[in-house]
Amino acid sequence: MVIKKAEHIISAVGPAQYPDTGLPEIALAGRSNVGKSSLINALVNRNGLARVGSTPGKTRVINFYNINDVLMLVDLPGYGYAKVSAKERQSWSELVETYLTGRKQLKAIVLLVDIRHQPTADDQTMIRFIRESGYIPIVVANKMDKIGRSQLKKQLDLIRTTLGLDESIEIIPFSAVKKTGVEALWQRIEESLPE
Ligand code: GDP
């Protein structure tokens, strides 16, 4: 996709603040620090659109980005940061579940995992939630630049097995730093949009 416009619309703390544009939405989910902000910047080819490296686990908002007046990228708050209280965890769940259930314009959910590691229990919960909500996940394995070429297949197999993905679901190897996988991910996103 040629990016002509990429604009942060709002950091929403609840449904009343979700933008009312009617544009189809693509949500991004993943652990804190997995590289969601970096991936958004790589996708839109802007360095400062999403904030990279902000305090993990502290972002209790849903960020909406208007892309070309064609779709919204919706950045869900990261999960899995150890140092959060039960109360914060609860507010995360409420915020994310409220968005993911019953948001009509939501067309696909991208789950971002770290290619170096076995997906966590939280990642497994998230993929289950995505599938139970009726979405086919788009799985992206980030930080590919951190592993050697010879490890690629083994790591993708580990992610596939741990997340219980059959061969019909492609895992997109990605590097937000090297901008590897950007085209492949845009293609999947565009395929998810209504005609
Ligand atoms: P977020 O918490 O998921 O939004 O993650 P960030 O985008 O803030 O990234 C967390 C850290 O991982 C930062 O230090 C990034 O520079 C780094 N990072 C993100 N993507 C990549 C990648 O593809 N390769 C490498 N080597 N580092 C990355």
Image (tube, helix red, strand yellow):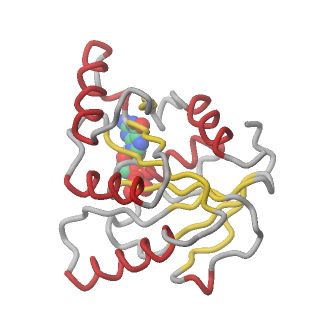
Is 102 drawn above or below residue 152 in the view shown?
A: below
Count how many numbered circles sit on residues in the image. 0
42 horizontally vs 71: left or right = left
Tell me the residue at 41%/63% (across/down). Answer: 54
For the view shown, which residue lies furthest in the top direction?
Answer: 150
190 horizontally vs 184: left or right = right
The spot of residue 174 in percent (x, y) is 45, 32
Tell me the residue at 62%/66% (across/down). Answer: 64
Frontmost residue, 165 versus 189:
165
Tell me the residue at 43%/38% (across/down). Answer: 140
Q: Quadrant of residue 3?
A: top right
Q: Quadrant of residue 142?
A: top left
The spot of residue 43 in percent (x, y) is 60, 42
75 horizontally vs 7: left or right = left
Frontmost residue, 191 versus 85:
191
Position of the C terminus by quadrant: top right
168 horizontally vs 18: left or right = left
Frontmost residue, 36 versus 129:
129
Tell me the residue at 29%/24% (across/down). Answer: 147
The spot of residue 128 in percent (x, y) is 32, 55
Frontmost residue, 165 versus 51:
165
Position of the N terminus by quadrant: top right
The spot of residue 83 in percent (x, y) is 19, 71
